[in-house]
Image: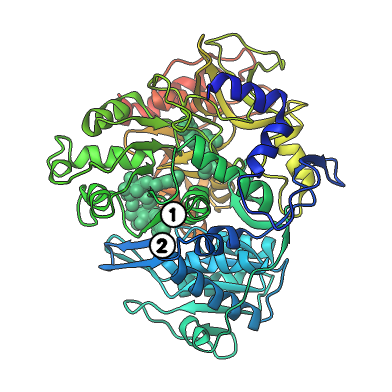
């Protein structure tokens, strides 16, 4: 297959292309229409198709003779537990838990929040929801109670699935306490919680509200799959936007199943029976797509790793897992590789392991910098493939398609468009930009199957956030450019979203938190470059005059406030107090310039700046750290 021919077909003859792809999965009823529009005039794929994602991920494989193949490997260096589930065993566990949900009155269309660490029960909970048509919303464990409360209010779950706690390296995370605080804050009240007790952090259950996971399972009747419509939602996953309120990305069943299967074939070259490992977290889209749904739909073995790239117990842990389970395809974030590089630069730990099974390393979540690319390529002596995507797309939009045949890798580029993605680089005036000119990365609509059909209960925001700025296109929020060979280079977000250690966070949300502090007159938070985490949020704060002398204490309070409100994962640890913020004459804060000064990179001063001397003040404040 030639990439160019098939890519052209996926753009000019998209319905044909996606009909062929749809034929590769097991529908109960094949769709009547491949592409159409819904009542809100938004594009939808596979109208009339009937399927069930849990059936595709489990039952199909048992029916087709893969019942005894390992479906899921749980490896937890933080607790010392390892466990394997065959497809038959996983199907049994999922059916039992689906029975628990049904017995608790959960039905098709109900929502369920899952707030759990990387344990098999979290995957079982997701697949059990999918089985009965309940819509799950997994919340990342690194988020604090307030973030959980926001998501509970928006998703309005019938139940919360949770664990008593988690382990982050040496630290115990008390999930039960966090859920209780969130329920206290949230105005929406679910009917109860199903609690997985972990022996290192047992918790008390509130009678009549909290139910023990294993006790419920003991009396459960296995539940079979519901026949769902292609357009029925499978899950909601909240992600940071440009305001304090996270966006509830909706994923439907039909397009998602087809697109993930397509991506496993063309992007990852992952054949049924192979071992696929995404070292991410189920709280992020990578975890949803490439720990849970895609590998299972494809009939691979997937790995659920409850640990970190380092310190669990050391920087050889990833290589140990690859050797132990004969991983064929490995996917992680560049920040994880940088963490390993720092601890094992010469590869002494790496060389202890036999990595002969490994074919590819895929990297995403942030741009792969050239130094990291070169270091890890030299170490692995295998293709290292940067690929670009986001929660909204659910699978890669740019990649080097291993399943079609790798093209030469250009370090710094995330490759070429995946089939179905008509990616353009536009100027602020909405004109196509020639090679090497940086602009907004947009995708001509309709987006291919699997991408978000809308936002949970908020299609106005969907249109405003993604479709209005460049009519006829979906705006990704990223900037970038193409080269003369049509490779695309993503240069970073051009909105208020930042990527910290591969975690997507909103700087405006942090600004809202700082601005709510009694001593703060005004503030800006920008994402500054960081060698390890890619970016780190840094606060620039103007204090109300009467508090000028208390900056040290206020700095601690602000850092604690962000940590308590968003969570430790925000990694907000630096505050600079300044006299004034650089602004335009109309009062707009010049965040780009603040960031450029902090990162010591060249910048252009807009003619609309209110007062140039403020830039010297800023440089002076930062000089202690940056000069
Ligand atoms: N639950 C609770 N807390 C969490 C958490 C979770 N699931 N994940 C992270 N945190 C906490 C950490 O413990 C840390 O807390 P601290 O400030 O008390 O130390 C804080 O959030 C920041 O975490 P992180 O950014 O992960 O930094 P780290 O120093 O703990 O680890 C790395 C650094 C590079 C090892 C780690 O960031 C990493 O593994 N990154 C890869 C991430 C990844 O795979 N992303 C993929 C998304 S596609
Ligand atoms: P998330 O929705 O959490 O997956 O974050 C998506 C964002 O991460 C994108 O919009 C990009 O800003 C960034 N990102 C993900 N992968 C890459 C990549 N390969 N190169 C550059 N940026 C990336």
User: Disc 1 on helix, strand or loop?
Assistant: loop
In the rendering, which numbered label is found on residue 118?
Answer: 2
Within-10-Å neighbours for mark 2: few <14, some 14–19, many 20+ = many
Q: Position of residue 248 (x, y in %)?
A: 66, 52
User: Disc 2 on helix, strand or loop?
Assistant: loop
* Cα separation between marks 1 and 2: 7 Å
Pick the front one: 317 or 598: 317
Within-10-Å neighbours for mark 1: few <14, some 14–19, many 20+ = many
Q: Is mark 1 within 8 Å of ligand 1?
A: yes
For the C terminus, give its image quadrant.
top left
Relative vertical location of residue 11 with respect to residue 551 in this rendering, above or below? above
Pick the front one: 490 or 20: 20
Q: Position of residue 322 (x, y in %)?
A: 27, 49
Residue contact between numbered discs 1 and 2, judged by CB atoms under 8 Å: yes
Q: Is residue 523 visible?
A: no
Tell me which numbered mark, 1 or 2, is placed earlier along the sequence.
2
Q: Which residue is mark 1?
A: 281
Q: Residue at x 76, y 38 (%)?
A: 464
Relative vertical location of residue 514 with respect to residue 587 in this rendering, above or below? below
- Classify residue 111 as left or right of residue 531: right
- Tell me the quarter of the picture where residue 106 sits: bottom right
Relative vertical location of residue 595 with respect to residue 464 in this rendering, above or below? above
Q: Residue at x 50, y 74 (%)?
A: 92
Q: Position of residue 348 (x, y in %)?
A: 12, 41
In the rendering, which numbered label is found on residue 466?
Answer: none
């Amino acid at each position: 297959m030639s990439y160019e021919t098939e890519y052209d077909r996926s753009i000019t003859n998209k319905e044909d292309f996606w009909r062929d792809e749809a034929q590769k999965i097991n529908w109960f009823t094949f769709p009547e229409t491949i592409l159409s529009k819904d009542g809100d005039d938004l594009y939808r794929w596979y109208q009339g198709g009937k399927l069930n994602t849990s059936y595709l991920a489990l039952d199909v494989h048992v029916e087709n003779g893969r019942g005894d193949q390992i479906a899921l490997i749980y490896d937890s260096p933080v607790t010392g537990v390892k466990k394997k589930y065959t497809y038959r065993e996983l199907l049994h566990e999922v059916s039992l838990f689906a029975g628990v949900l049904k017995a608790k009155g959960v039905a098709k269309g109900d929502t369920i929040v899952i707030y759990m660490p990387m344990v098999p029960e979290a995957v079982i909970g997701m697949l059990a929801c999918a089985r009965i048509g309940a819509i799950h919303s997994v919340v990342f464990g690194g988020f604090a109670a307030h973030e959980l409360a926001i998501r509970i209010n928006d998703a309005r779950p019938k139940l919360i699935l949770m664990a008593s706690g988690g382990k982050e390296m040496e630290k115990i995370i008390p999930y039960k306490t966090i859920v209780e605080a969130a329920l206290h804050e949230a105005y929406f009240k679910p009917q109860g919680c199903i609690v997985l007790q972990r022996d290192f952090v047992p918790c008390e259950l509130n009678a009549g509200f909290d139910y023990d996971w294993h006790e419920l399972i003991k009396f459960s009747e296995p539940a079979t799959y519901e026949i769902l419509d292609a357009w029925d939602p499978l899950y909601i996953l909240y992600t940071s936007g440009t305001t304090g309120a996270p966006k509830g990305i909706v994923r439907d069943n039909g397009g998602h199943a087809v697109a993930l299967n397509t991506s496993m074939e063309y992007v990852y070259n992952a054949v049924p029976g192979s071992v696929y490992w995404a070292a991410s977290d189920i709280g992020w889209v990578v975890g949803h797509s490439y720990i849970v749904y895609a590998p299972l739909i494809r009939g691979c073995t997937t790995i659920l790793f409850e640990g970190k790239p380092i310190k669990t117990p050391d920087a050889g842990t990833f290589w140990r897992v690859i050797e132990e389970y004969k991983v064929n395809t490995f996917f992680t974030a560049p920040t994880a590789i940088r963490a390993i590089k720092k601890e094992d630069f010469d590869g002494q730990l790496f060389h202890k392991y036999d990595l002969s099974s490994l074919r590819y390393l895929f990297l995403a979540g942030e741009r792969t910098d050239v130094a990291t690319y070169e270091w890890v390529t030299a170490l692995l002596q295998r293709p290292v493939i940067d690929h670009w995507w986001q929660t909204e797309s659910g699978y890669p939009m740019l990649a080097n398609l291993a399943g079609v045949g790798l093209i030469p890798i250009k370090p710094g580029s995330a490759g070429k468009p995946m089939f179905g993605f008509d990616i353009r680089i536009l100027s602020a005036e909405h004109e196509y930009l020639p090679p090497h000119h940086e602009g907004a990365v947009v995708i001509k609509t309709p987006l291919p199957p699997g991408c978000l059909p809308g936002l949970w209960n908020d299609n106005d925001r969907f249109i405003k956030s993604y479709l209005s700025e460049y009519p006829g296109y979906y705006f990704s929020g990223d900037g970038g450019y193409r080269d003369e060979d049509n490779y695309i280079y993503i240069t970073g977000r051009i909105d208020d979203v930042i990527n910290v250690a591969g975690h997507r966070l909103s700087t405006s949300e942090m600004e809202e938190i700082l601005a709510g502090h009694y001593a703060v007159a005004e503030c800006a938070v920008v994402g500054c470059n960081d060698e390890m985490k890619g970016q780190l949020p840094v606060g620039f704060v103007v204090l109300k005059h009467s508090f000028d002398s208390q900056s040290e204490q206020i700095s601690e309070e602000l850092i604690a406030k962000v940590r308590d409100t968003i969570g430790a994962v925000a990694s907000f640890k630096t505050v600079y107090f300044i006299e004034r913020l650089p602004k335009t004459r109309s009062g707009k804060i010049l965040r780009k310039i603040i960031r450029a000064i902090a990162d010591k990179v060249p910048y252009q001063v807009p003619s609309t700046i209110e007062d140039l001397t403020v830039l010297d003040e800023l440089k002076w404040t930062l000089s202690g750290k940056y000069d």
